[in-house]
Image: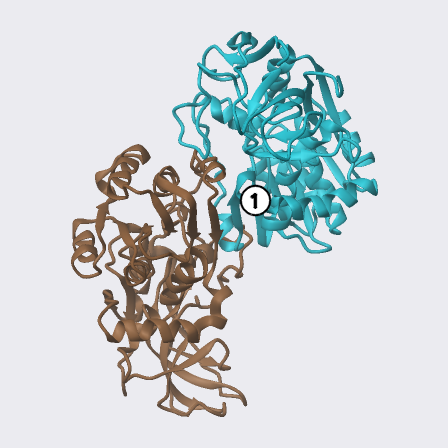
Chain colours: A brown, B cyan
Amino acid sequence: MTEIKAKAIFLNEYPAGMPQPSQFRLRDIDVPALEDGEMLCRSVWMSVDPYMRGRMRPEVKSYIPPFSLDAPLEGGVVSQVMESNIQGYEPGDYVVDFLGGWKSHYISKGERTQKVDPNMAPLSAYLGVLGMPGLTAWAGVTQILKPKEGETMFVSGAAGAVGSVVCQLGKAKGCRVIASAGSPEKCAWLENEAGVDVALNYKDYKNAGELTKALAQAAPKGVDCYFENVGGMHLEAALNCIGFGGRMALCGMISVYNNTELEAGPPNLVNMIGRGVMARGFIVSEYIDKAMEFAMEVAPLLAAGKIKFQETKYDGLEKAPDAFIGLFSGENMGKAVIRVGPDTV
Amino acid sequence: MTEIKAKAIFLNEYPAGMPQPSQFRLRDIDVPALEDGEMLCRSVWMSVDPYMRGRMRPEVKSYIPPFSLDAPLEGGVVSQVMESNIQGYEPGDYVVDFLGGWKSHYISKGERTQKVDPNMAPLSAYLGVLGMPGLTAWAGVTQILKPKEGETMFVSGAAGAVGSVVCQLGKAKGCRVIASAGSPEKCAWLENEAGVDVALNYKDYKNAGELTKALAQAAPKGVDCYFENVGGMHLEAALNCIGFGGRMALCGMISVYNNTELEAGPPNLVNMIGRGVMARGFIVSEYIDKAMEFAMEVAPLLAAGKIKFQETKYDGLEKAPDAFIGLFSGENMGKAVIRVGPDTV
């Protein structure tokens, strides 16, 4: 076995509020000898995603256990097999893995792993539009919102890895799509590249009342489908503009993830009653069994240029904490990915 | 045609905050001559229901138009046909009517009207367990919550016309049922007559944190189904205790109906995401086409004594405003009904 100098990122402490670079550290790690049923992988691209903030709150009950302070962080990664004692995986194969991230090399038992073809799409796309964020977007749209042609869809966090796919699926399904994002550049990309009907820069609106007015103007027939990534004033404005029989897919509330105190919820939830509104919180792992259905719908749209995507690329495993923190400051355009190693060696 | 001295209740002004008796007045009204396709009815029992408060807010968009200040109020009533120019309705027939209430006599075109049999159940029951509140309870349970045997159901406003039926349907479906109500007498009825597993007197708990502790203790495996009649700290406690895959039927939020300022929503909506929770607001009119299915499920349970109900009876049309105001002070036990005329004349 090759001598490997493996590195990984650990958490020094659980963040309170906005995560800080000093709370992460890069460490050397040992890579033990391979056993039967294991393979050695080297990371090529790794992912940072907002849901990881939830794994840094050990006091909150969630669908996935909190990160340990005594082990490397975990997350999505595209990697290449170096050695394999698992039938079906050969050295040189590329895989996407839900847990192998935040490490330069790691040993996998092949669980939560899918092989991917580097000739079908850029490898990093398997962390974004063709990966977990893409499946999240597709599941929220097709399994929860179920938009009909001619309906109006509102998407918060619309320039992000999930939101940008939601917007374009909405357009592909014949909806009027209103997008909200946090900079003129993001709004320009949404209108000019992703093809949304109206992009609102939410930083132009001081409160839920102002955002409600802008949304009502952009959605004169009301909002039929709301895809929630943000929470706070976005949810309140959506509840003000939601129409009879409206649906809301609750995917994330990034505005509250770093709060140290609980923030009050929207005062207008009662609108859900009179308007017969359904809201469904969800996590992508519920829909893992539909990954093939997702790929068969999204891959052709991607190939036809009907779904475009953006990436913000960071270079080097040591940059992963900055990329992660950037998720909450809004500085990444589209999917944030970190180059950990070369495509080929 | 008989000479009729008809009376009806009008609103003097729209209430701000808690409705006051002075905002209502009893007036004589004319009953015009019957035309073709009309029938004259005399009210026997009328209903007051929390949803009527929404019709007193002309500024809010809702599923039903606000009450006019220039016409009698409207609401559910059981009445007897006196004269009829509608084929199929004969003098002496009893009908339940969604809009004829708040009047001693009225002319109907037979719309939103069902004939009822006075020998099958007490007439007033067609305003409660066999009427709109019963259908509301049944729809929330069977069409939204879909409880499975062995699951835990939490019901707020549990001693009310809707909540008491929800609790007993939950028991009939094999659930552990935790009920919340606002007095020791209501809790005793729920535990001893309605057969719930635990009844919590919410007035014993100062805030959502205290109610959460009590609910968590009563529901050690978490809440699978929440039937929401109240809002405020009840919703917050339910969201704290809701389990993975939980469902919430949002039927009412009586705690906020008389607010003059918007009250903040629960700070823990984000729990819906990690726990994959579905919430559905609804109004009974969505399920009118299932009234027969409802009757076929609930009537046998009622006949078998598996669904019990309570009524608070007021005597005389002039008492209807007091009965209505009593909905918000919690002073009614079970369904509030007003005797407007004798069963037979």
Is residue A50 found left or right of B115 in the rendered image? left
Q: Is residue A66 above or below residue B227?
A: below
Q: Quadrant of the C terminus of chain B?
A: top right
Q: Nearer the viewer, residue A256 or B230?
A: B230
Is residue B49 found left or right of A246 in the rendered image? right
Q: Amino acid at mark 1?
A: Tyr
Q: Is residue B301 above or below residue B7?
A: below
Q: Nearer the viewer, residue B105 or A23?
A: B105
Q: Residue shown at 29%/82% (left/top)?
A: A120
The local secondary structure at tag 1 comes to helix
User: Where does the image place residue B79, in percent across and percent down from the top left?
Assistant: 66, 24
Q: Nearer the viewer, residue A128 or A235?
A: A235
Task: Locate residue B230: give its quadrant.
Answer: top right
Q: Quadrant of the N terminus of chain B?
A: top right
User: Where does the image place residue B30, in percent across and percent down from the top left?
Assistant: 53, 11
Q: Residue shown at 30%/34% (left/top)?
A: A207
Return the chain for callout 1.
Answer: B
Q: Nearer the viewer, residue A213 or B38?
A: B38
The residue at which mark 1 appears reads as B287
Viewer can see residue A340: no
User: Where does the image place residue B118, in percent across and percent down from the top left?
Assistant: 76, 31
Q: Residue shown at 83%/40% (left/top)?
A: B305
Viewer can see residue A17: yes
Classify 10 Å Cα crowding around label 1: few (below 14), some (14-19), many (20 and above): some
Is residue A241 found left or right of B228 in the rendered image? left
Q: Is residue A217 above or below residue A305?
A: above
Q: Residue shown at 43%/51% (left/top)?
A: A250
